[in-house]
Image: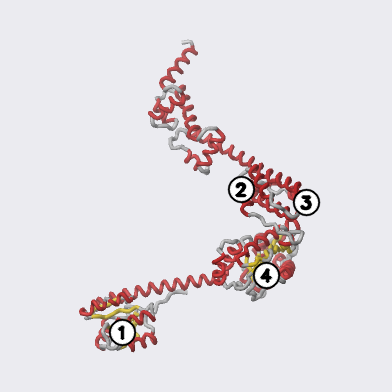
Amino acid sequence: MELTLEPLKVLIVDDEYLIRNLLRMRIDWEQQGMTIIGEASDAEEALEQVELLRPDIVFTDIYMPKMDGIGLSGILMERYPNLKIVVVTGHDEFEYARQSVKLGISDFILKPIRASELLQVTAKLREAIEQEMGREYELMKLREEMKQSLPYLRERFVNQWLSDVIPEDELQEKARFFGIAISSGEPGSRIAVMEVEVAVPQAKIAAPEVYQHLSEPYHQTPQTYQVQRGPQQQQHQQGQPQLSQHQTEGHPQPAEEIHILLRMVGMKQVQAFYPQDSQTIIVMDPHNRIVVLSLGADTEFANQVQQLQEELQHTLKLEGCEVDVTVGIGQWQSGWGRAFVGYREACRALDYQAFVGKNQVICFEDLVIEGGKRPYHSDAQLLQQLQFYVSVGAGEEAVLLLERMLSVPFSDVSQFRMAAMDVFTECQRAAIEQQLEGEHALNKEAVAAIFTAGHLPELKNMLEQHVRMVSDVIQAKRQAKEGNLIDRVMAYLEENMGNAEVGLSSTAAAFYVSSGHLGRLMKKETGQTFVEYMTQLRMRKAETLLKQTDLKGYEIGQQVGIPDPHYFSVLFKKHIGRSMNEYRNVNLKNENIDSGV
């Protein structure tokens, strides 16, 4: 889509034919990118012509019978805000014509009409109109781009809604913009989160049979997967995915591509399961899981999701590959502002697959064994704080916080196990963040022990041990890393002490750490501040040079990175207890005594 400018349409309004003819003949309108489409002899005729011809520019005389040019301009500006109006006036009418500026008139020209003045006015008008048309064109392009991006923007809005980052008073307005029908009566929602996973053996990656089971969904939406075709493949049905020789011989498709394809096929099938259903919203969340948000009645939702899960399992089954479709369902939430609660519950129910297995539909309310009891709700703020303590190796603080988290009343062991799952998940995140490996990253025996313990005291003790163990491993790793850093910093300072520019900031930058962090590590490891340690290092070097060389004091100061002779002299005496001359004389005297001179 490109912007094409047609000649601008001009209407001339004047009760004198000679003036109208003069305006028409005075300049080459075509050369100015304009064309005169009509004339009018009075205001009434002008209004009819504007309505009929829709000009871009109107030249109007100021004095006309029945209605003058000022009155006509006021009506035209009110009806057609984008219309450009130029008032033609004489010298004796100039002050009167100035009133037209208040109406928003574009310009005015004086009689007698000169070609140069008319050319200036038309050039200015053309430039203004072209700029406006350019802005309108850009706005139209932006609207078109927004229209194309609307599905993405709608999905982004739903994910923000489910993440509780949109104020409740804005939800309804934004939902209406994206065409989401939220009930004005007693609104509510229920949410299912579906996870599609596939374990692809290396031998199966890029093998044709991995893809052939996906042919039907992709036949419906061929644009979702583009394939290479050779002449020998043209006889295949249009849109049917085929693997090229390049793909199957030496250039296998990565497993991640298969995962993406499966999720896309799963998304298409879920959308097909709810055709033309304005009460059901289907999006992909930031974790590449399919989210089904139902704004309708709660009666059949769980049964529908169960049927959908079974259909997905059947459709996405790959020969030689294990495809898992697991679903978590949150509880019914009254009020569309609480959809985020249902989403969190669905995610928590989905996480429970680690303990009940995959390929199941897990309802959040079923995680509480005894009916009628208040379900467990995790405290996101406390869990985030726990992860922070564990990730920095603050074991004691983490254990104290854990005791606080577990001090809430639990109705049964199942609720406590849900809390334990939250704690274990945060420890796992901290371990991954700190790049722990092996059993420290995932101690399966500890997990099994935590979730098979029979009573609360035993569970609390095991959970405390796990939190302390992960914290201690991270702390040990951190201390080893910090110790190694300080060793390298000390070697660096030893080598570069002669550079007067070497300081805390430059050294921290050289090792890609903050000045504050390096300063604290130096104090912790050496018992001295960075400046104290650096000064002591330079003074020791100065002592050595005084003993072993005949260098003058200022020369020694330069070699140890303190080029100011006076400042170096003061520092030396403060740290050594003698001036440089006294130190050298005493040292020389001792050497003479030792040599028997």
Q: Is residue 347 above or below residue 436?
A: below
For label 4, the residue is 270
Q: Which of marks 3 and 1 is nearer the N terminus?
A: 1
Q: Which mark is residue 452?
A: 3
Q: Is residue 184 above or below residue 250?
A: below
The image position of residue 468, as x and y in percent, is: 68, 43
For label 2, the residue is 388
Q: Which of 383 and 320 is in front in this view?
A: 383
Q: Under tag 4, what secondary structure? A: helix
Q: In this view, does 590 lie above or below 239?
A: above
Q: Which of marks 2 and 4 is in front?
A: 2
Q: How far apart are marks 1 and 2 (CA)?
A: 76 Å
Q: Which of 290 and 553 is in front in this view?
A: 290
Q: Nearer the viewer, residue 510 or 476?
A: 476
Q: Which residue lies furthest to the left in this view?
A: 92
Q: Which of marks 3 and 2 is nearer the N terminus?
A: 2
* Horizontal side of residue 507 vs 360, given as left or right: left
Q: Distance between the residues labelled 3 and 2?
A: 27 Å
**Mark 3: few/some/many CA within 10 Å (<14, 14-19, 20+):** few
Q: Which residue lies furthest to the right in this view?
A: 454
Are the residues flagged by discs 1 and 2 in contact, CB closer than 8 Å? no
